[in-house]
Image: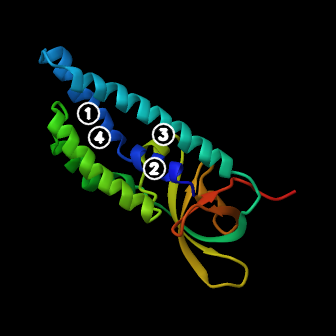
Amino acid sequence: MSVAFLLSVYILSYYPLWLSVCFIDIKSIYIDKNSAIWTERIGLVSVGVLVILCYCITKSEIKRKKGIAQSYCYSLLEVKEQKAKVMDYVFTSVLPLLAFDFTTWSGCILFMIFFSFLCVLSVKHNNLNANIILDFSGYYMYECRLKLGEEDDIKTCILSSDRNLFDRKGEIIYLKTLNSEVRLDMGIKEIE
């Protein structure tokens, strides 16, 4: 996986935080009527550009990965949707970051230091976090048990869109590996 894709997924996984930062900045500008609003203006523009850029990179990388080349045929044995994964991530990883004061330079710099260290660790370990933007875009995470030919069962997480994997239980599906834990559903019913 490309570093740009991992960075984009990491940044988008904090989407509720970015919305909260924008709300805090808008409140500081229009309701609190602060006289020094450069921090807020820079924050609003930066967050807006960053989220749009990361969304475009993530969608294009997933679209680029779709296709039969380098995908493998698996038997889908068990399927369980990971409904609580996004909520768990928001409450344990995103919510604590709201403690930073985003209306001051010192608060923003402290946040950037902390966020940068988390980002480096996430990219270094090839981590795909639960992502609320992908969830809103129609991609769902499933915990599955698969079989590849005569090999032992594989437990993995599958990122899927455009179809419900519960309907495909017991059938053959085509997957492409995103990282050691997550595979992307190609959405292909059969190869011509």
The residue labelled by disc 4 is 17
Could you say whether the residue bearing mark 1 is in a helix, strand or loop? helix
Could you say whether the residue bearing mark 3 is in a helix, strand or loop? helix
For the N terminus, give its image quadrant: bottom right
Q: How many angstroms separate mark 4 from mark 1 (CA)?
A: 6 Å
Mark 3 and mark 1 lie on one chain; the one further toward the N terminus is 1
Residue at horizontal 47 percent and vertical 46 percent from the top: 8
| CB within 8 Å, label 3 to label 2 | yes
Q: Where 33 falls versus 110 (above or below)?
A: above
Could you say whether the residue bearing mark 2 is in a helix, strand or loop? helix
Q: Position of residue 178 (x, y in %)?
A: 58, 61
Q: Position of residue 75 (x, y in %)?
A: 68, 71
Q: Amino acid at mark 4?
A: Leu
Q: Nearer the viewer, residue 173 or 93?
A: 93
Mark 2 and mark 1 lie on one chain; the one further toward the N terminus is 2
Of circles 3 and 4, the one toward us is 3
Task: Tell whether 190 sits left or right of 107.
Answer: right
The image quarter in which residue 84 lies: bottom left
Give the numbered dot on residue 21: 1
Q: How many angstroms separate mark 3 from mark 1 (CA)?
A: 17 Å
Give the numbered dot on residue 54: 3
The image quarter in which residue 37 lies: top left
Q: How many angstroms separate mark 2 from mark 1 (CA)?
A: 19 Å
Residue at horizontal 54 percent and vertical 65 percent from the top: 179
Q: Amino acid at mark 2?
A: Leu
Q: Amino acid at mark 1?
A: Val
| CB within 8 Å, label 4 to label 1 | yes
Q: Position of residue 49 (x, y in %)?
A: 43, 29
The residue labelled by disc 2 is 7
Give the numbered dot on residue 77: none
